[in-house]
Image: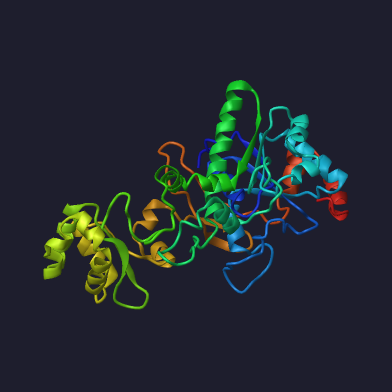
Amino acid sequence: MPAGPLSNLRICDLTGQLAGAGATRYLAAFGAEVIRVEDPVRQGRWDVLRGSGPFVDDRRGLELGGAFNNHNVEKKGVTINLKDPRGRELFADLVRVSDVVTENFASGVMERMGFGYDGLRAIREDIIYVSNCGFGHSGRYAPYKTWGPVVQAICGLTFLSGLPDLPPAGIGFSYMDHHGANFMAIAVLGAVLYRQRTGRGQWIDLATTEAGATLVGPDVLDSSVNGRPLRRPGMPDSNHSAHPAMAPHNVYATDGDDNWIAIACRDDADWRRLADLIDEPWAQADRFAKVDDRLRRQSELDELLGRWCLPQERRALAARLQAAGVPAAAVLRPGERVEEDPATGPWGLWPTVKHPEMGAVRVDGLPLHLSETDWSLERGAPRLGEHNEEVFVGLLGRSSDELAILRAEGVI
């Protein structure tokens, strides 16, 4: 593969989990040299995913965690004890040769170690520093610690997810880790472009709760302008669509155990196509002819359509609906989408990387392709301290004898 478009970028990366590590993962996929810094004393466990499942076989250990490998592909790994003065000196040397420093510790952690933005700028004046935490570094909530579900609860996402007359359902996984990582990657690229133009770095202070709040704008507008609370009779309704108005718009049970199909009629023309395919008197009835009528009778419509779908095989039914021009898809389990969908291979969304402990394993790719400067993922996540010699000796100019002493004394 030719050098990636970000191959001139070096990132000193202290991030963990996905909120931060996901962002540097994207940048590494496009060629950035990402040097991941971990703690030798805590055996790398400021990232709780190191050594956590899923696993490829019966083996367990710090180097065998599937999630950690997935989030840290194409990165290099070093260990530095930042509580030791010699470790802080080594870290400062790494900052001097880096373009970006990234972390997603709780607010104030880097400042207490002497490596907040002012401290980093004293080491390298044009450094780009990214701090990614729940509430950012200002305001009354800045000291609070968060996790994905906590962020989703605070920003309003959990409240707007669910079905009528039932408690908030949440999203089911730490979606804000992904969303925050996306914002972080974009922000880094923006700051790099700014430095190319001006020669100046800057501090990117990212709050994942604010990132989440960007997703609830229509509900805030509805409340502030129309005076309508989100939780009112019939709302929220995550399976139906009122804006834009669509009916039917739901998932329906099909033949077999826990098998479903999603159907959405965008307009009356879609409904007529579906009604012709159903070919039953109720589908041709005038009371369902217009979208406003279908919306008023949505419960009845769902019940009738559900009965029609129930005895049918979901994929065959989806194919029939698609052929008729009706938007529909079988609800797939993750394994079915990855292993059985014929589009998976050609798109390349699940590349195989080589990991020295786990062997050849598949990881998440990126859901996009660039015609001239595409991404590449080939190397698995770094083992703990795997690149100490390469980085500290080859890049920073320390001697192998010095490294042996630092290693023996728990500095690296």
Quadrant of the rendered structure where residue 129 is?
Answer: top right
Q: Going by the image, does 402 lie left or right of 101? A: right
At x 12% / y 64%, what residue is drawn? 285
Residue 376 image offset from top left, x and y in percent: 50, 46
At x 78% / y 49%, what residue is drawn? 80
Taking the image as drawn, is residue 355 in sight? no
Residue nearer the viewer, 183 or 136: 136
Residue nearer the viewer, 280 or 236: 236
Report the number of numbered marks: 0
Compared with 222, 381 (above or below) is below
Q: Going by the image, does 118 lie left or right of 410? A: left
Taking the image as drawn, is residue 404 in sight? yes
Q: Going by the image, does 327 lie left or right of 190? A: left
Residue nearer the viewer, 16 or 388: 16
Residue 41 image offset from top left, x and y in percent: 80, 57
Quadrant of the rendered structure where residue 329 is?
Answer: bottom left
Question: From this viewpoint, which residue is outermost toward the top?
Answer: 198
At x 25% / y 56%, what residue is drawn? 327
Residue 300 image offset from top left, x and y in percent: 24, 68
Q: Going by the image, does 207 lie left or right of 261? A: right
Residue 60 image offset from top left, x and y in percent: 66, 70
